[in-house]
Image (cartoon, helix red, strand yellow):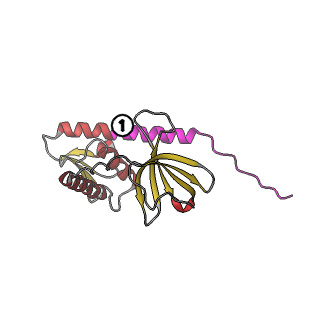
Amino acid sequence: MRMAAEYFSIGSSVAVTTCHNIEYKGEVLAFDWTSKVLAIKSEPTNGARGQSDVKLINLALVSDVKVLKEADDQPQALTNLNLPRIKNRLRDSLEEKRRQVNYVGVGVPPEGQKIFFAITKTISDVRWDGSNIIVMDEVVIKPPYRLEDCSARKSESSQALQHVRKIVSKFLQEETSQAERKSMSPSPAPSSSSST
């Protein structure tokens, strides 16, 4: 392989021919000398305005590289990272993962776990208390997790109870209709294998 330079300046225009005789042209975005990987930006193949295709090219698989135009000016300085924002996003993400770990009930039947997940799609304040589902510390759903198994923990929780019952009712209706569709769908005919 002939290389036009020992390194590539960011912003330079290059033409790269692969060992499969495919040519790529574009602007150098990055170059890593140790791994011999060149990142170039080119016109988008989908024709969309304001977008670019980015290709990572392993120079070990390249037969020719030509620098078409050297970069005129220094590359732009990298913007500073907003570390407090990154830390907040990381903290929020970890809290969400911890909450999701607590979403899995230990020793609960699959029906209870499914109802639990259905509730968490609407209400985030849901937890397990043994085999009971506790919603907003106001509603408890006990096994076998039917509509009549929903009850208010406090007398002033009737609105929360109504809301949770709607969610459970909708979930149970969807489960019933799915089961009916499965039972009505034709089962595949058993394959008969005959040896000749």
Could you tell me residue 12's position as x and y percent? 42, 49
Q: Secondary structure at mark 1?
A: helix
Could you tell me residue 122's position as x and y percent? 28, 41
For residue 177: magenta?
Answer: yes
Kind of residue at disc 1: Lys
Placement of 113 over or under 183, stated as above or below: below
The residue tagged 1 is 170
Could you tell me residue 148's position as x and y percent? 30, 43
For residue 126: magenta?
Answer: no
* Residue in the image at 57% along x and 38% along y: 184
Could you tell me residue 87's position as x and y percent? 21, 56
Placement of 157 over or under 74, stated as above or below: above
Q: How many numbered discs?
A: 1
* Residue in the image at 30% along x and 44% along y: 119
Which residue is outermost to the right?
A: 196
Quarter containing the N terminus: bottom right
* Residue in the image at 59% along x and 39% along y: 185
Judging depth in this view, the residue of 53 and 15 nearest the camera is 15
* Residue in the image at 27% along x and 50% along y: 77
Q: Is residue 66 left or right of residue 49?
A: right
Magenta residue span: 168-196
Quarter containing the C terminus: bottom right
Q: Is residue 5 left or right of residue 72?
A: right
Placement of 194 over or under 42, stated as above or below: below
Judging depth in this view, the residue of 54 and 191 nearest the camera is 54
Judging depth in this view, the residue of 8 and 96 nearest the camera is 8
The crowding category of the residue bearing disc 1, from other C-alpha atoms within 10 Å (few below 14, some 14 to 19, many at least 20), is: few
Which residue is outermost to the bottom?
A: 34
